[in-house]
Image: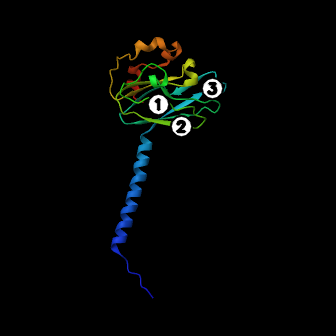
Amino acid sequence: MKTFKPDPRRRLILSAGGGLLLSAIVFRRANAADEIEIAMSGTPTGSDVWFRPNGLWVKRGQAVRWVNRDVGNVHTTTAYHPDNHKPLRMPKSAHAWDSGYLLPNESFVVTFQETGVYDYFCTPHEHAGMVGRIVVGEVDAAERPYADTDAQLPAVAVAGFPDIASILKTKR
C-alpha cells in the first residue's frame, strides 16, 4: 500500500493559484463598483423619455453603464460623432460609441479615457430631447462647448444639455 506524503511545493502552488483567483474576483468587483449607472427611462405612455442623470462628471478612466429601465421602449446611447452621422461633440481623440437598440434591462458600457465634454443622444428619441452630457476630468466651468454645431441639432436636444458649471458643481 502506498502512503501519502504531503508535497510542500504542491501546497504552495495551490495557495498561489487560489490567491490569484481571489485577487481577480476582488479586482473585478472593484472595477464594477467604479462604474456609474445612467438609467434610460420614460413615462408608461412613452410621451416623455430621458437619461437620468443627464449630466454627469466622471474621473478619467472611469466607466459609465447605461441601462434601459424603460419596460415599454427601446433606447440607445450614441455619441455625437461623424461616425454616427452627427457633428462632433466630444474630444477629437476619443472613440465614438453606439450601443445599438437596447431592450428593457439591457445595458452598454463605455470607459472614458480622454478629458473633455461628451454629448450623446438616444437615436429614436433625439427629437424628443433625450440627450445627455458627460464631463470627464477637469474642464473650464464657464465653457460652452460645441456651440458652433448647435444649429445642426434639434432645438429640443440643444435645450436638454445641462451646462458644465452645474455638472461640476454637483460632481455626480
Instruction: Please report whichever mark, 3 or 1, sits nearer to the chain's N-terminal start.
Output: 3
The answer to whether residue 140 is visible is: yes
| Residue 38 on image: x %, y % | 50, 32
| Camera-side mark, 3 or 2 | 2
Mark on residue 43? 3
How packed mark 3 is, by other alpha carbons closer than 10 Å (few <14, some 14-19, many 20 or more), is: few
> Total label count?
3
- Residue drawn at x 65%, y 31% as measured from the top left: 72
Q: Read off the residue under disc 2.
A: 107
* Amino acid, disc 2: Ser
Say above or below: 135 vs 34: above
Q: Please, which colouring scheme is shown?
A: rainbow
* Amino acid, disc 3: Thr
Mark on residue 97? 1
Front in this rendered view, residue 34 or 77? 77
| Residue 131 on image: x %, y % | 50, 22
Instruction: Please report whichever mark, 2 or 1, sits nearer to the chain's N-terminal start.
Output: 1
